[in-house]
Image (cartoon, grey):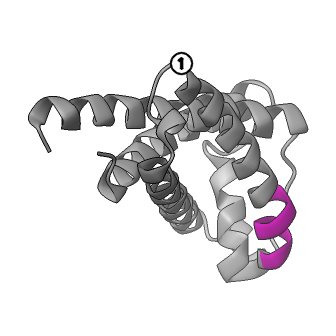
Amino acid sequence: MVRWSDGLIGGLIAGVISALFFIIVGQQFNHDAVLGAYFVHFADAAFGSRAATMGPLALLFGLFVYFVAAAIFGILYGLVAASFKPMWKAPTSAMCGITYGFVMYFVIEDILVPVLGVTSYQPLWEGLVGNVFFHGIVISEYITIAFRRNVAAGA
């Protein structure tokens, strides 16, 4: 009853919400000089040290990479949820979302960042809160809602 497309949509919604979190935190706590400077670091993987001087192009590319990753993580969650009932049944779905957020954080920070050669300046609390509460839980609850919608529609 859960489709990969539900994961895609949930991942993109969670991506928007977590992106807003990282933008707000970047401005209010990290005092980033550029709005959305967090996303410019994603462009480092493709453009290297030139990304900091590319201005809005690096920011747009970084946002694109961020949303592609959010979509991929969403699809993966949807595929696993299709065969694992606790991921789309409340209240266990929230715990699955929290767990998924932790897994996402460690995959990003410990695998993707070193492999891509991106510099990570993000404090631990910011990464964990952003990935667990503003991405993991959002996608898990969207999948729960999508499951209920699919059942009601008879799909």
Q: Main secondary structure of the magenta part?
A: helix
Q: Outermost residue, left direction?
A: 153
Residue tagged 1: 91
Q: Is residue 40 above or below residue 46?
A: above
Q: Point out the image quarter for the N terminus.
A: top left
Residue 55 in the image: state x and y as whole percent: 60, 63
Which residue is at a point 41% across and 40% down the rendered structure image?
13
Residue 63 in the image: state x and y as whole percent: 52, 57
Which residue is at a point 48% across and 21% down the rendered structure image?
90
Q: Quadrant of residue 54?
A: bottom right
On screen, residue 25 versus residue 6, left or right, reads: right
Q: Is residue 121 above or below residue 92?
A: below
On screen, residue 38 versus residue 21, left or right, reads: right
Q: Is residue 147 above or below residue 45?
A: above
Which residue is at a point 56% across and 58% down the rendered structure image?
66
Give the extent of the magenta segment: 109-115
* Front position in the image: 147 or 128: 147
